[in-house]
Image: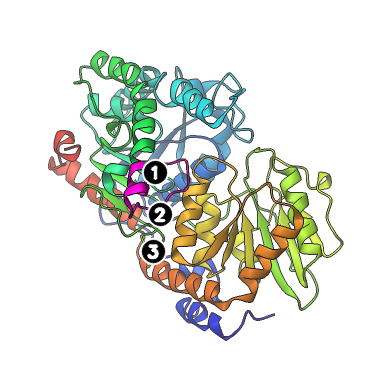
């Protein structure tokens, strides 16, 4: 069933490509005039690996040589992207027992969100930086590269590349929550402060976050000095000390106050569906369709899915719930008119959807807004409250508590379906995102950096970090 006349802007923005997300994606030339060699470093987990490997596919499609340092769990995906898989040797991701579905980045189960940050900082990002640097240097000595592009949560990789004199690009899969650049720190789902009270609250959060990340600097600086590099004193440099920082997000959704240094580029989200997505057929009926998609990794979401399913049972809608690899669909109780499947190509489902209920993960939010679909966001942790804050600020959806009862979920879903202003706001974002994606800007930035590197004109890291 059509979603109404207010959807016309979206349909027009998609041109003649069948109205799907693929039609919004720029199609690069089969090969570029000059080919380069890239070394990537990937972190497992759908929100990290899938968008990074989408960039890899963009580069291999243009004839570039790409290798990817990654664990065994990503080997097939790397091969499918047309790149060469390179295993970790010393870094903790070499451990074949690592479980990306359960997000076991740490050996110890976290007791709280703050404890989770400590564990990820000490066991993945900062603590093993020297091991990541060693693996990177060993691979570059085996075979040089023009650019090393790494998940921004692996600063040790970038240390290794800097020590070898190779140009670096840190790739962030979601927004960068850096207060010095005009946006609130991650954690509380805040908007840029406007009142004195809000500024004071933001300042407290900023100091807490800086102190948390500052505790990881000794391990990082040990890796830097051990590789002949000067130490850093600012926690920002953990994520921003690269020749380029590519943020796989759209300025259409970012707060207008975001003002990063020039070497930081918002290059747009990656909208590819994961390879593990199953085929899908729309359920019968003419009622509006609501998609439910929470995390693809384990966050204890089964009870939340069941409450959302019960809420959909109260509304005149059809529901489709995708559980992801972490949840068995048979474990989710749902009314007859709500279909529960492990996976489906969200790009296709969103062509039929009038709304989506999601945890607020950046990848799911980006796909929904690229399709012009308004959202009900029920954050469950990590950066999800902060992404949801951007959705609400843009007028493209509402935010609610994931612990809410079915009646409250039904109320919020009905609010988004009943007020066309949400769909119109989502449509405006979709039109901007479609325009942004006429060129694959992530690929273009990496090609430009590689060209500068080969000509010896890369911006010095010291200047980029200033």
Q: Are marks 1 and 2 in contact (CB under 8 Å)?
A: yes
Instruction: Answer above or below: position of 324 versus 92.
Output: below
| Quadrant in which the N terminus appears | bottom right
How does the figure colour the protein chain or chains?
A: rainbow
Q: Please identify, in this view, whether the residue under mark 3 or under mark 2 is nearer the observer.
A: 3
Instruction: Examine the residues drawn in magenta and state their main secondary structure.
Output: loop
Residue 252's tag is 3
What is the span of residues highlighted in magenta in the rendered image?
185-200
**Residue at horizontal 39 percent and vertical 70 percent from the top:** 432
- Residue under label 2, please give it: 249
Q: Sort mark 2 into few (<14), some (14-19) or many (20+) by Cα contacts within 10 Å.
A: many
Q: Sort mark 1 into few (<14), some (14-19) or many (20+) by Cα contacts within 10 Å.
A: many
- Residue under label 1, please give it: 172
Q: Quadrant of residue 354?
A: bottom right
Which residue lies most toward the bottom here? 5
| The stretch drawn in magenta includes residue 424 | no
SS at mark 1? Answer: strand
The x, y position of residue 111, in whole percent, is 60, 25
């Amino acid at each position: 069933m059509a979603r109404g006349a207010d959807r016309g802007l979206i349909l027009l923005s998609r041109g003649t490509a069948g109205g799907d997300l693929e039609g919004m994606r720029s199609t690069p030339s089969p090969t570029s005039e000059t080919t380069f060699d890239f070394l990537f470093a990937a972190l497992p987990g759908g929100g990290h690996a899938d968008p990074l490997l989408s960039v890899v596919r963009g580069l291999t499609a243009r004839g570039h040589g790409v290798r990817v340092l990654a664990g065994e769990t990503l080997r097939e995906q790397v091969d499918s992207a047309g790149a060469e898989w390179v295993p970790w040797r010393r870094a903790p991701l070499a451990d074949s027992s690592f479980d990306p579905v359960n997000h076991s980045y740490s050996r110890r189960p976290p007791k709280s969100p703050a404890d989770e940050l400590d564990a990820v900082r000490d066991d993945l990002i900062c603590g093993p930086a020297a091991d990541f640097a060693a693996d990177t240097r060993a691979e570059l000595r085996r075979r040089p590269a023009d650019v090393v592009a790494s998940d921004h949560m692996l600063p040790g990789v970038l240390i290794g590349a800097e020590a070898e004199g190779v140009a670096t690009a840190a790739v962030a899969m979601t927004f960068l929550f850096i207060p010095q650049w005009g946006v609130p720190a991650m954690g509380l789902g805040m908007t840029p402060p406007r009142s004195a009270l809000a500024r004071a609250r933001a300042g407290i959060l900023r100091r807490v976050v800086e102190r948390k990340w500052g505790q990881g600097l000794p391990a990082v600086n040990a890796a830097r000095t051990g590789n002949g590099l000067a130490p850093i004193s600012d926690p920002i440099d953990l994520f921003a000390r690269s020749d380029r920082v590519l943020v796989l997000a759209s300025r259409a959704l970012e707060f207008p106050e975001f003002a990063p240094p020039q070497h930081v580029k918002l290059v747009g989200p990656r909208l590819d569906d994961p390879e593990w997505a199953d085929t899908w057929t729309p359920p019968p009926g003419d009622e509006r369709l609501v998609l439910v998609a929470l995390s693809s990794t384990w966050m204890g979401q089964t009870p939340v899915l069941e409450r959302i399913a019960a809420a959909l049972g109260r509304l005149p809608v059809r529901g489709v719930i995708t559980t992801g690899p972490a949840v068995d669909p048979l474990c989710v109780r749902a009314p007859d008119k709500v279909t529960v499947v492990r996976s489906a190509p969200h790009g296709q489902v969103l062509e039929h959807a009038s709304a989506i209920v999601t945890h607020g993960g950046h990848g799911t939010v980006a796909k929904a807004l690229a399709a012009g679909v308004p959202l009900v966001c029920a954050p469950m942790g990590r950066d999800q409250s902060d992404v949801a804050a951007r959705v609400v600020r843009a007028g493209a959806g509402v935010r609610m508590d994931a612990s809410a009862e079915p009646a409250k979920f039904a109320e919020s879903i009905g609010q988004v379906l009943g007020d066309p202003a949400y769909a119109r706001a989502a449509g405006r974002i979709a039109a901007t995102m479609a325009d942004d994606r006429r060129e694959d800007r992530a690929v273009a930035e990496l090609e430009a950096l590689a060209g500068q590197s080969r000509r010896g004109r890369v911006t010095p890291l010291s200047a980029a970090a200033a």
